[in-house]
Amino acid sequence: MKNLLLSSSLLLLLFYGCSFGHYRQLKETNVLTTAYPKSIFGDNFNSFLFKTNITVYKKNFSGLLVTKQLSSNDYRVIFTTELGMKMFDFEFKDSTFTLHYCVPQFNNPKLLNVIKNDIETLLMSNLLNKKKTNYEDKKGVFAIQQIKLQKSENYYYIDKSSGRLTNIEQAKKSIKKTTFTLSKYQNDFPENILIQHHDINLKIELNLLKK
Amino acid sequence: MKKIVFIILLLISISGFAQVPSGYKMVKDTSAFKQKMEAQSKLINSIESDFTQEKYLSVMSEKIISKGHFQFKKVNMLRWEYIAPYKYLIAINKNKMYIKDNGKLNKYDINSNKMFKSINEMMVNTVQGNLLNNKDYKAKFYENEKIYLLELTPTQKGAKDFLKVIQLYINKVDYAVEKVKMIEPSEDYTSIDFSNRQTNQAIADEKFIIK
């Protein structure tokens, strides 16, 4: 038992150590752009349709997620099952969040808050005028922008050769909590988005069907 | 005084008319219709059809359209498959339910989950047009030259939260369900149009066992 405790605390230490080290490796730079990272959803009032899987512990919710920009800082995000049943309906307007609808399966304040936070991070609509620092990774592959938000620090990884946003990491006190991986870019839009939480068993995968 | 009574009566009758969907009138002899519908349903051992599903969300400018194919065989075997723009298969075989999503298969015992049980009942009854004698719905009957329109209003509290009314459009010639429209309290809806319908063709039982 003692051994188990020791090894698990060692593991824990290792895990946290790695997470701390993860951001310590970054070099601060001044040469980079002063522009804020650009939202993948752009600013053209389009709607986007994703085949979506939300996995929470052992439960899996599959369906279609639609995002629609209603005005310059107003987004509506709706999740329905494949059969058409609406699961949740969110609105992000300026810095106000409105829950228009949600089924009992999602009506858990903690779960709703995590999903809301993930979608808000992905929309990248409220970043202007936040404190921003520019970094670079050791190999010089990525330009990294750190933006300090109220409850977290977000790191935006932009591939220098393509200029594309490939990762968003959300950290709290330098510990990585969530990774957003944006891949399979077509016409400047990532057709696959994977949101993986590290501190809870929650994963969201979005595959673009139509924009 | 007489005038006022007349106006009130007029208003009541107008509002009474307003409830009838435009282009339709009330069915006078509902029991004859029910008997015919049940008799037709007894003659059917299998149904196979293509379908087009439209999801209307008031905030979106476009409907979400998905297409697929379904097969039904008595008793209680259903294969409901989306083909475009995504692949998703839901199959019901007696008390088992299969969901195949992105090549990943999940099996469920229908009796283990209240939601699966109601999905099963709803889907199997809808494709057969068999919701008439269900106590969970209050039925109204309308008709025009070609179509019987059944409006089913849920009576159970849980169902009322996400469903305002189900409309079944039934062909007067062969009593086939041509279209199902599920309207939510927000007026958003899902409508499913059936085409290329074939009845009583041989369908192998293996179609309802998903591997």
Image (cartoon, coloured by chain):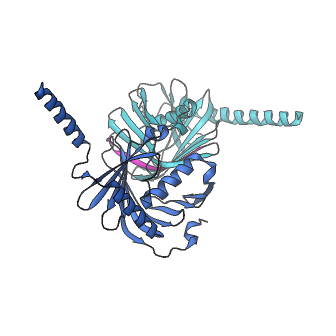
Chain colours: A cyan, B blue
> Which residue occupies the extreme front position in the image?
B2
Observer-nearest residue: B11 or B59? B11
Magenta residue check for B152: no
Q: Magenta span covers which residues?
A: A41-57
Observer-nearest residue: A80 or A144? A80
Relative image position of residue B170 (x, y in whole percent): 34, 60
> Which residue occupies the extreme left position in the image?
B3
> Which residue occupies the extreme right position in the image?
A2
Relative image position of residue B64 (x, y in whole percent): 37, 51
Relative image position of residue A120 (x, y in whole percent): 46, 34
Magenta residue check for A56: yes
Q: Is residue B64 above or below residue B16?
A: below
Q: Quadrant of the rendered structure where residue A108 is?
A: top right
Observer-nearest residue: A80 or B175? B175
Residue at 61% x, 34% y: name it.
Answer: A177
Q: Quadrant of the rendered structure where residue B29 is?
A: bottom left
Q: Is residue A131 above or below residue A176?
A: above
Residue at 16% x, 35% y: name it.
Answer: B10
Relative image position of residue B9 (x, y in whole percent): 18, 34
Q: Is residue A184 above or below residue A37?
A: below
Asked whether the viewer can see residue B102, the reply is yes
Asked whether the viewer can see residue A42, the reply is no
Number of disc labels: 0
Q: Is residue B140 above or below residue A103?
A: below
Please indicate whether residue B200 sits to the left or right of residue A151 in the image.
left
Which quarter of the figure is the N terminus of chain B placed in? top left
Which quarter of the figure is the C terminus of chain B placed in? bottom right
